[in-house]
Amino acid sequence: MERAERGERILEAAGELLLAWGYRRVTIDEIARRAKVGKGTVYLHWKTKDSLLLAVVLRVQSRSHQRQLARMRSDPLEILPSRALRGHFLDFLGEPVLRALYTDDADILGRLNDTAKKELAELIAQGDRALRRHLEVLREHGLVRDDMDVHHQQYALMAMATGFFTSEALLSDRAPDAPEARAEILAHTVRSALETCPGSGADLGVDPAVGGVRLAAAAAAAPEVIPLYEHLAELSAQEMRRQVRS
């Protein structure tokens, strides 16, 4: 078995056990058994249980980054905060590890969330810088309102995301059943709060002329926005490689 393939099997097994048992109960022995490799083989790839489980988190985040980039590359309007956050929310719903991470689920993550915040501090800071620059570019192209400080705008966007993410656990009995409906409510909230044309979007029947101007502005801004997230994805990949025993 090739080293890369073996590593993927170990990551897959570790992710399954993390979700099923939680951080405290997962052991390297059980991960090795699930992956059908020897315990020593796991340690050939990762020095510690924490480094392996951090790699699980990074792998899931990397998939989310790649899906976000694919959406932006295929449609410039996906750089709008409402559209980007809608896609990210659906990714969040589809990835149990992301849900545990963003809702600080101690039953699943145990101390791993604190470890991740410490180990991945620079990656988290880079994500904040990318988002701020993303908003600045959109403001320059007239796609986002500029009547409030960009740092306050970034805080508002993150607060809205956090509210909707945590509501999945806190308000599950009151939320619309369809994930797409909840995602659309989030997109509408962000669009109304931050974007210059709150009624934009082909699904809302906007004036074609207005829609055309907005699409042209997004197409002009996309080449400045997409590299921000390409760089973030590469930093995430580098961090994942750092966790691997060389």
Image (cartoon, rainbow, N blue to C red):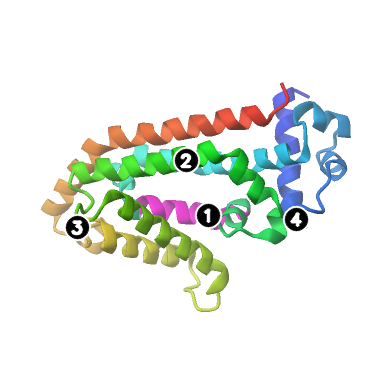
Residue 207 lies in the magenta-colored region? no
Work out how far the residue at label 1 is from the one at label 4, CA to CA, in angstroms.
Answer: 18 Å
- Frontmost of labels 1 and 4 is 4
> Which residue is denoted by mark 4 in the rendering?
22
Kindly give the residue lying farthest to the left in the view shown. 209
Q: Which label's residue is closer to the chain start, 1 or 2?
A: 1
- Mark 2: few, some, or many residues within 10 Å (few <14, many ≥20)? few
- Looking at the image, residue 122 lies above or below residue 209: above
Q: Main secondary structure of the magenta part?
A: helix
- Mark 3: few, some, or many residues within 10 Å (few <14, many ≥20)? some
Work out how far the residue at label 4 is from the one at label 2, CA to CA, in angstroms.
Answer: 27 Å
Q: Which label's residue is closer to the chain start, 3 or 4?
A: 4
> Which residue is denoted by mark 3 in the rendering?
197
Q: Which label's residue is closer to the chain start, 1 or 4?
A: 4
The residue under the point 29% across, 33% down is: 224
The numbered mark at residue 92 is 1
Where residue 43 appears, x then y in whole percent?
Answer: 81, 30
